[in-house]
Image (cartoon, rainbow, N blue to C red):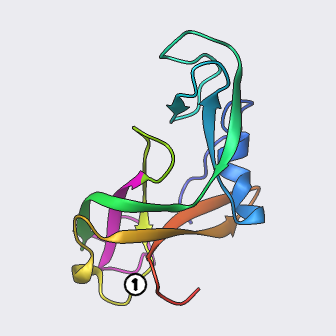
Amino acid sequence: MRPLPELTPENTAFWTGGERGELMIACCDDCNAAIHPPQIVCPACLSRNVAARAMAGTGTVYTCTVNHQPWMPDMAVPFALAVVDVDGAPGVRVTAPVLTDDPESVGIGQRMQIRFEAAGDVWLPHWQPLGAGA
């Protein structure tokens, strides 16, 4: 089991939105900036009018890597990690493992869809190639 994030008022929507299948990203209600990781003050305009919004849950791989090192006991390797530019949230990138049988097939520019896995009180994000089975 990997360490789980601590839920805070700022990040709870992000870590629990997966229960509904929603990628929740903090956004400023004043200047419309997307904010990730979530914060209570908008770094663009310093407004405190920040709330989480559901995003489409799709994006494009910005960069990726294939991990061959089992960092924890029983960790299955190899696996791909991808940093994905989130559609509808300019400047937001979410890093997560990729659900695929062929980690070496993950590449820059590839389209992805978010999926979630329950772990305690949180829902961990995972990327899956767009068009792959649910």
Residue found at x 72% / y 54%: 17
Dividing the picture into quarters, in which one does residue 91 lie?
Answer: top left
Q: At label 1, which amino acid type do we have?
A: Thr
- Looking at this view, is 58 or 123 the one in front? 58
Q: Which residues are magenta?
A: 69-85
Q: Residue at x 24, y 82 (%)?
A: 105
**Residue at point 43%, 40% (across, down):** 90
For label 1, count other residues whose C-alpha is less than 10 Å away and answer few (under 14), some (14-19) or many (20+). some
Looking at the image, residue 111 lies above or below residue 29: below
Q: Position of residue 133 (x, y in %)?
A: 53, 90
In the rendered image of this protein, does residue 12 appear above or below residue 31?
A: below
- In the image, taking residue 20 as reference, residue 4 lies left or right, namely left
Quick check: 21 above or below 17?
Answer: below
Q: Quadrant of the N terminus?
A: bottom right
Which quarter of the rendered picture does the C terminus lie within?
A: bottom right
Q: Position of residue 84 (x, y in %)?
A: 38, 56
Q: Nearer the viewer, residue 113 or 79?
A: 113
Does the stretch in magenta take in 84? yes
Q: Which residue is mark 1?
A: 100
